[in-house]
Amino acid sequence: MSTTVATPASVERGESPARRAVRRFLRHRIAVFGLAVIVVFVAVALLAPWIAPYDPVQTSWTAIRKAPSAAHWFGTDENGRDVLSRVIWGARASLMAGVVSVLVAVAIGVPIGLIAGFAGGWTDAVLSRIADAMLSVPFLILAIALAAFLGPALENAMIAIAITFSPVFVRLARGMALDAKSTDWVEAARALGNPPWRIAVRHVLPNIIPPLLVQGTLAIAEAIIAEAALSFLGLGQQPPAPSWGSMLNSAQRFLENAPWLAIFPGAAIFLVVLSFNLVGDGLRDALDPRADRR
Amino acid sequence: MRTIIAAALALGAATALLTGTAQAQPQQQHLRIALREDPDILDPTLSRTYVGRIVYAALCDKLFDIDEQLRIVPQLATAHRWEDPRTLVITLREGVRFHDGEPLDAEAVRYSLMRHLTMQGSFRRSEINTMESVEVVDPRTVRIRLKEPSAAFLSQLTDRAGMIVSPKAAEAMGRNFGTRPVCAGPFRFVERVAQERIVVERFPEYWDAGRIHLNRITYLPIPDNTVRMANLQSGAVEFGERMEPDDIQAIRRDRRLRVVAVDELGWQSLQINVGNGPRANTPLGRDPRVRHALELSLDRQAIVQVVYEGAYTPTVQPLPPANPYHVASLRPEPRNVERARALLREAGVTTPLQVELAVPNNPDLRQVGEVIQAMAREAGFDIRLRAVEFASGLQAAQRGEFELWLVGWSGRVDPDGNIYSFFVTGGGQNDGRYSNPEADRLMNAARAELDQEKRKALYEQLLQILVRQDRPRLFLWHRKNIMVHSARLTGYRPVPDGLIRVQGLRFE
Amino acid sequence: MWAWLLKRLGQILPTLLVLSFLIFGLQQLMPGDPALILAGEERGDPQVLAQIRAELWLDRPLWEQYLHWLGNVLTGDFGFSWRIRMPVAELILQKLPVTAQLAIMAFLIGTLIGVPMGILSAVRRDRLADWLANAVALFGISTPNFWFGIMLILLVSVQLGWLPPSGYVPLTEDFWQSIATTIMPAFVLGTNVAGVLMRHTRAAMLTALSQDYIRTARAKGLTERVVVWKHALRNALIPVVTLGTIELGRLLAGAVLTEQIFTIPGFGKLVVDAVFNRDYPVVQGVVLTTALIFVLLSLVADLLYMAINPRLRQA
């Protein structure tokens, strides 16, 4: 680890911050690998009709729960459907549920948290107690009420997930805002007469990006699994359409007799979550203004 | 990290040493039974759940019981006689005592029956509401008068409505009787921790004590099937009820376990909305030919094979083969997609016909929904599945917010309990609002007919209308109760009601 | 400081009040009629339904129901479960200790594994230890609890015969037996917490380690151990505290699936049964209890923020 102090190298080169970030990210080989895996998954989801070897809902009563073979690489499920094709098609629902709902949760939670932390006083008290209250409403109640009102659609499941996930982002952003607010440089900026919003965007936001990246990429796993719970309550993807979460759910009955039913969708979730986390780590480094010294 | 895992494993091993002995060797004649659900309140008058009846089999004796052939046999009663079609005289067993030492006499029987009939919130009322009065003739004899003749009445006394509770305890405890039930069964209540365990111990003064060999029974609710299996395999329990068909193979391979599969009393069906609100106004709800087409598109044997390893019995009627009123000539028609298509054409339906099927949110029934969807598609039905959670579903059913619904019934001994309220006009469970005056007439005649042969003929006529003509409900299969127990346990008698009778059970 | 604390405690009551009102509203939005469920096989009889509705005040206007319930709660009466006729307060007091035991064990496992693993990972960045720690953490997070739980039971109980596969023994009855029945579910829940805390600790430590003052500290010749433990860790703790308190709250609110798999009679099962059976007094009681837990934990979080960053005390 180099201990060279003073100006980052990039500034000397007169490079724009965006280019610098891209360059740093690409240098991060693991992160690039993660990104590649995500791109592959997205491509698989988009190209599902062309690359899936079988129709994902085509049942076959003569091929119930067959172990992986040359004809069915990932085996067949409890209705004789091809597991590989279902994993491929399931990528659509699961990636959507995982990524979009987390993005919405971030979009709701982070501004509220920043306002609470930065404004303090009554604003903070009210917003924080709302977040506490939201954390304590059982997911089930919200899911059942929404299922009745919005009906079974993937978008509605994403709304339910986003609502339940947002208080965590409120709390995270608020905690970081509180901490950042008390630092010398924010106080200096304030003394110089910068408006609060500019301080928030310029000085506080960059500080909270690392934990947000961590939490956001972790929440994807939770969201993919939550979608399955919702589809069971009549919200979200309805059978026979596949999603990784609901494939895992139906595999629960056969954990001993047909372990491949759980292993392949489970592995897909793990890979996607791992990749997003690697990309998150890479982004964190790329955006850290001091990281170039390594 | 490595040290932490090592420490955790060491801790695990240490606790295993501490607990291992207690777990591996059950106490002498102590039976541990894994239940599929946690029973509700243990008051025979107020309880609703099926699983509670399994516990009552040890706690509370009934006036009558049923045997393996579903025949009614005496228990607390020794004999019965109809003075006329509306008057039943019951003779009681002598020397029977409740768990609190009180004698069980005619007055106690009168008290219990009236409690079932009149207590606020009683779930027995609908079972015995034909009862008009109970008279104590002498300490060993009661006379029951009915408002109208009822062939099903006696069979109600073989279940919770026939359980006799100690009047003294019931008066003292009131609505809280269920927290410490006092009956006259072979075992008495020791303790209950909700969702955890119910413990009962041998009652030495039981009237039939010679057939009781166990000292103690612990009932443990373990809802997850895999975990129930794990408990059986590791010897943490000796009996598991209502296991899944998928496990039969594994159990047969395990020499320490025995499996018994008994036909149940109930059925599984597709209920069709034929007259409840605007959702009934579909080709499926209006036209029996369309319902017939749907039925012809299904291969019941294949459904049962795919989802339940072929363990259940395909059916077209509400009465299982074990029931004396089962109509042997009514068998499932073979699947016939061609005829189904022809029927749809004849009915003037443009295919694909969109139908919504509501399925309960449990894994195996959801799979059944997917199988039905795939089969019916070939005949021209486009079935959309909708997973519904229990309470939402109940309300939707009542309000007629459904077209097609996968729904089951745990079943009763008497045929009336499997048919009447599901088909009679205005019946409590007739959510599709089926109504046919001729069917109503036959149902009412059959429930009042005491002669078995005549009654059988009435049901045969009725079922022809229900399952061959109008088809407001398509029956699919009868389940099996799959019971698993330790090979060391002997004396289990499989009765179709799925209860675990404790008489004769013992560890070798 | 004391004034601040008092003000915070004063916020609890209004929060619970508003929440209870919201839950009442949500219950109206939920489909499903409690009377239909309670009537069971008699649900076709309008008289029975009317009788149940009258008894439970379900036939009154919403505001009347709410005020009736609120009035009782203010006198300490949380009502009784419609389904099993037990007082709500008693049910909660019965289940809470079980869940608390499980939650605390899981949280300890989670923090004791997660935080050190995160620090190690940050200090040994891009080395084998970092890789392994990340893989384990992400595996813990993306593996559904039911799968992990059942696998543990099959391995530890069925194959090895070390621990009872399911069930629960209270601490007061037999300490070691109690630990034996809860260690597996606590481990399943703990791995999730460990994964979350590991990832946050790692990221925060990396940020802290690249700050100016750390370089200053190093330049001053402080040992690496002092740098890591005293300076970097302290500044890394804010997000870890945030997530730690939320995770603890979630554990205390009850983990349904894990409780179900290991047949632990805890809070999670109580909530789910109450919601599915529309047992509203129990739902209300449970939600209020959970809300109290979350409000108190966010107070704890703020106190910890101040301990970490003394400047926040002035704010």
Image (tube, coloured by chain):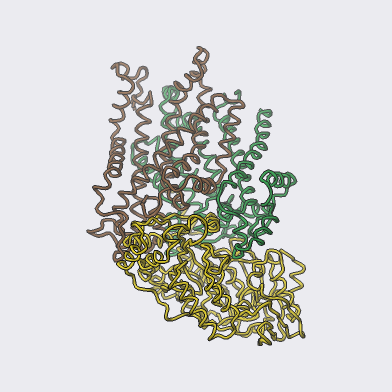
Chain colours: A brown, B yellow, C green
| Image spot of residue B262 (x, y percent) | 47, 76
Rendered view: C181 above or below B416: above
- In front: B191, or C27? C27
Rendered view: A210 above or below A196: below
Report whether residue C161 is seen.
no
Report whether residue A72 is seen.
yes
Which residue is outermost to the top? A192
Which residue is outermost to the left? A70
Q: Quadrant of residue B22?
A: bottom right
Q: Quadrant of residue B90?
A: bottom right
Q: Quadrant of residue B116?
A: bottom right
Residue B192 located left or right of residue B323: right
- In front: B473, or B71? B473
Rendered view: B45 above or below A122: below
Residue beneath the point at 67% across and 55% down:
C53
| Image spot of residue B184 (x, y percent) | 68, 77
Q: How many marks?
A: 0
| Image spot of residue C82 (x, y percent) | 65, 56
- In front: B485, or C156? B485
| Image spot of residue A281 (x, y percent) | 37, 34
**Quarter that holds the C terminus of chain C:** top right
Residue C179 located left or right of residue B189: left
- In front: A244, or B123? B123
Residue B260 located left or right of residue B131: left
Residue C181 located left or right of residue A212: right
**Quarter that holds the N terminus of chain C:** top right
